[in-house]
Amino acid sequence: MSQYRLIYSALVSLYGEPVWQPGLAPVDELISTILSQNTSDANRDLAFGRIKWRFESWDAVRAAPLTEVLEAIRPAGLANRKAPRIQDILQILWDEHGAITLESIASMPLEEARGWLLALPGVGPKTAAIVLLFAFGRPAFPVDTHVHRLSKRLGLIPKTMSAEKAHRELERIVPTEHYYSFHLNLIRHGRQVCRARIPACQRCGLHSYCQHYQGLSGPESG
Ligand code: SF4
C-alpha cells in the first residue's frame, strides 16, 4: 500500500470519513477565508459575525465607508489590509455581475474557476481551493498550515516544499474523492496530536508511517 493510502486509512480509522456537505454560501466562504488569513479561527469567526451583523448585505459592505468595514473586522487582525481587499473584491463582483455573487464559477471548468479566483486581490491558492472545495464541492485541495506541516512530517511532500507548491503536489497524490475528508482529517490531527511546536508522537496513531517520527526514534526502531 502506498504511503498516502496508509496515512489516509489510519486517519479514517481515527476520525471517520467526513462526507462533503455544503458549507457557507460562496461569497461568505470567500470573505471568511480572507478574514482567516494570519489569525485564529476564533478571531475570524468573531470578525465574520461582526461584519454580517453590522451590514445587511455584501453590497452594503461594498458601498460602506472603509472605516466602518475596518472597524467591523478589527478582531481578525490586519484590518488595514483586509478591509480594502474585501471591498475591492466585492466591487469586482459587482462590476462583473451587477450583483455580489460567485455563482458563475460553479459552471466554469475547474482551472478557469481557480484562475478567476486567483486573480482577485488577496486570493492565493489556499483561499481559492477553500472556496472551490467547501462552497462548490469542486475538486481542489486546500493546504493550510496544518495540512502543510503534516504533509511534510509524514513524508508526503518534501520538507522544503512551500505551501503554495504543495497544492499541486497533493492534488496529484490524493484521489479527488478524498480531498474533502483527507483535508479535514489532517487538520483535526494537526490540532489534536501533531501540533506545530510539540507533536504528541507517543500517542499518535500515525507514527508507524511518519518520516519525522522515524527520524526522531532512530534507525534501530525502524
Ligand atoms: S508521529 Fe509525531 S510528527 Fe508524526 S504525525 Fe504523529 S504526531 Fe506528527
Image: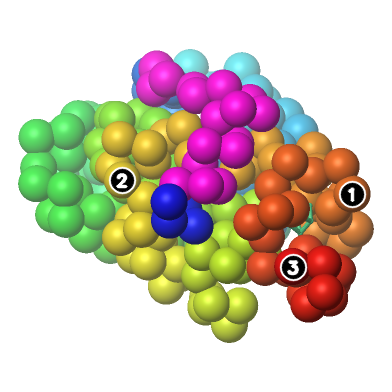
- Report crowding for label 3: few under 14, some 14 to 19, many 20 or more residues within 10 A (C-alpha): few
Q: Is residue 126 above or below residue 168?
A: above
Classify residue 104 as left or right of residue 154.
Answer: left
**Which one is earlier in the sequence, the residue at label 2 or at label 1?**
2
Relative to 151, say whether 188 is above or below.
above
Q: Residue at x 30, y 60 (%)?
A: 172
**Is 168 in the magenta?**
no
Query: Could you say whether the residue bearing mark 1 is in a helix, strand or loop?
Result: helix
Who is closer to the viewer here, 67 or 93?
93
Provide the residue designation for mark 3.
Answer: 222
Magenta segment includes 8? yes
The residue tagged with tag 2: helix, strand or loop? loop
Q: Tell me which colouring the rendered structure shows.
A: rainbow
Q: Which residues are magenta?
A: 5-21
* Residue 29 locus on image (x, y percent): 44, 33
> How far apart are the alpha carbons under marks 3 and 2?
28 Å
> What's the CA distance linking mark 2 and mark 1?
29 Å
Ligand 1, what quadrant? bottom right
Q: From where the camera sits, is residue 125 visible?
A: no
Which one is earlier in the sequence, the residue at label 3 or at label 1? 1
Residue that mark 1 sits on: 202
**Who is closer to the viewer here, 108 or 21?**
21
- Across and down, in percent, residue 69 comes to 59, 40
Which comes sooner in the sequence, label 3 or label 2? 2
Ligand 1 contact, mark 1 (Cβ < 8 Å):
no
Q: Which residue is mark 2?
A: 175
At label 3, the amino acid type is Gly
